[in-house]
Amino acid sequence: MSMLNGLSYGLLLFMLSAGLTLIFSMMGVLNFAHASFYMIGAYFAYQLSSWSNYWVGFLIAPILVALLGGLFERYMLRKTHKFGHVAELLLTFGLSFVILELVQLVWGRTSVDYAIPTAMQAPLFKLYDSTFQTYRGFMMLVALLMLVSLYLLLKKTRIGLVIQAALTHPDTTEALGHNVPRVFAYVFAGGCGLAALAGVIGGNAFITEPGMAQSVGAIIFVVVVVGGMGSLGGALIASILIGLMQTFAVGLDWSILGGAKSLGVEITSATPGYSLWSLKLSQIAPILPYLLLVLMLIVRPKGIMGTRDE
Amino acid sequence: MRVSIKPLAVGVASALMFAGAASAQNVKIGFIEGLSGPFGGVGQNQLKHFQYAAERFSGKQANSGVTVEIVPLDSKGSPQEALALLKKATDDGIRFVSQGNGSNVAGVLIDAINKHNERNPGKEVVFLNYAAIDPDFTNAKCSPWHFRFDAGVDMKIEGLTNYMKDRKDIKNVYVIGQNYSFGQQVSKFTEAMLKAKRPDVKIVGNELHPLGQVKDFAPYVAKIMAANADAVVTGNWGPDLVLLIRAASAAGYKGSFYTFYAGVIGTPTAIGAGGADRVHQVSYWHPNSAQSEIESVYTGFKAKFNEEFYTVAAVNAVRFLVAGVEKSKSTDAVKVAKAMAGMKMKGASGEDIEMRASDGALQQAMYISQWTKAGGKDVKFDQENTGFGFKTVRYLQPEQSTMATTCKMPKR
């Protein structure tokens, strides 16, 4: 069960970070507003599903957000491109705040009631005593479908070929008569759309509120860095790794205190630093990804599957 | 000629000002709270409670010469920011501050206010704590400048365990909480009091997780289920409680929840039908508790903001402040604090409440309530249009949940 929980959470992280890593590898821009597109995805889906039903939101919200992302790239990001990466970075950074405030203005500062469709609240199957909710299965299915179609798109189609070429040799690709800026816009829009899709299915599984972008923002950067900047495969491995790590760590009540005890060293509340030694692995589970990030940067700065050697 | 007019004019002006001060007094409450960030939604909602309480229980509507004004100061939930804002508030001449979300923030505010008052005689500040319920604040760390309008963790768990002790169906209890002073206190007191009152009950788990960091509670729920817990005691609030309960219903967990903050904004929606008859709350008030004047406050607040009213502590903080100013005929913080200490009035449900002078803890009634289908006389009001509301399953008089204090109150 923990395995499945970890996998489904990891796959959601992958959906989020796939777009980010694509955009980064292509344009060299770390899109700080990426998690904000995730948030708008969830809010759009909430709005659309409250007007009609869940499926309308599911289909239309990512498309709308992709359009917004495309417009943002075309009319803002491209204009700052000539001033270098720092300007682009700051632009996306600023955008994330603008989006946050806009979301708070439109939908308020508290969480909205974006519910899972009743059909999918039922348990999918039972393992021991706990049930696995259909919706979690659906989340995994969507993520896997997205993974496969992204792979096919990039590897088997002509546009994928152009994207790959533009990734590594933008000048040559342009010289061959392809409109590279337009490809960039497509990729940016696509990346935002993927983030929004993650928001659509993550927003109701967890919570749809203005703090949601901030809470995933840090973790997707971890995924991208650990997986290797710009590597889709790496992002997949890193997201699943982080998903599983967090889930399993919660279940483990290991601590230095326990370890010392089995070695015959008794640590009591009188020992200096007792609160540190008695800290259980389950207690620090949510910060493990950041520990991984630090370790990864020290040991292998380019990430698991990174190719950049700078 | 000019020279002779001026003193007269000044004299008249100051006489007018003096007359004005005597008939109408304005007091500002610096509302230092996380109004943005992960718990921003809760903070914003509490701010509305204070603004509404000030509107209803001071000034014209309350037929009082004392008008309370709320000055919102966004601490983003961080103790450092809160300290900076406290400095700003005192510089601006604000002598009453209020905060509640997070005992970690309240703790540093109390320390800072103690120091400030020692160093700046004549510019003292009084802290109206409406929700930070670490019992240390009214025991070991008690302060003459601190007044708490919520019930302490110890009082709440005293009430909760008095109820749980009679629930013979409870055998295995799991305690889960946020890893900061409040969550730690909940876990400590629950374990100790349950052990004393129901030695046969097993504590099958005692878990702390980081505050506001966990997105997916499914692994925690898996652990709770693996431990065979039939009851979960949690001090979680805001998104941390919403996500925990959501994950529990997704995993098909059938045990019951004993919470402190199931009524906080957004949480009732998350509990929904899935939590019926299983989610319990210990609180000093809920919308279906015995009503009095407060019922019109509840309905009025809902009509105005379309949000639920539940922080009666905000109302009490304003009422005590107004009464303190009226009694001491002064807006001086020291005099008001002296007037508020030991003050008695009627509580939200008509019971007698008292701001205990020995530790600054409001002595009030306590309710154990259960999430139940609305309708009938027990559940008149549902929460957040869910069709479900809280039903009193146990009422405790103020003296039934009171706790002795170890506070040695310093002089004001």
Image (spheres, coloured by chain):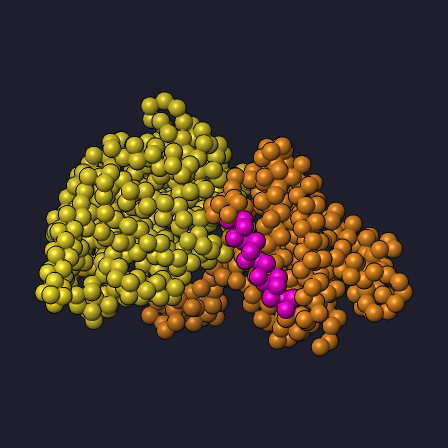
Identify which residue is drawn at 59% across, 54% down. Answer: A36
Residue at the (46%, 58%) spot, across then down: B210
Residue B162: horizontal and vertical position, in percent?
Answer: 28, 40
Magenta stretch: dominant SS? Answer: helix
Of residues B59 and B131, the one drawn nearer to the viewer in this rendering? B59
B94 to B350, vertically: above or below = below
In this view of the protein, which residue sits in the foreground, A216 or B140? A216
Task: Supply the letter of whichever chain is yellow.
Answer: B
What chain is the orange one? A
Q: Is residue A181 visible?
A: yes
- Kindly indicate the quadrant of the structure image that contains residue B395: top left
Q: What segment is highlighted magenta in the picture? A: A87-104
The location of residue A216, given as percent across then percent down, is 57, 56
Name the residue located 16 percent from the left edge and 55 percent from the top edge. B17
The answer to whether residue B198 shows anywhere in this view is: no
Q: In the image, residue A206 lies at what x, y percent?
A: 55, 46
Residue B5 drawn above or below residue A298:
above
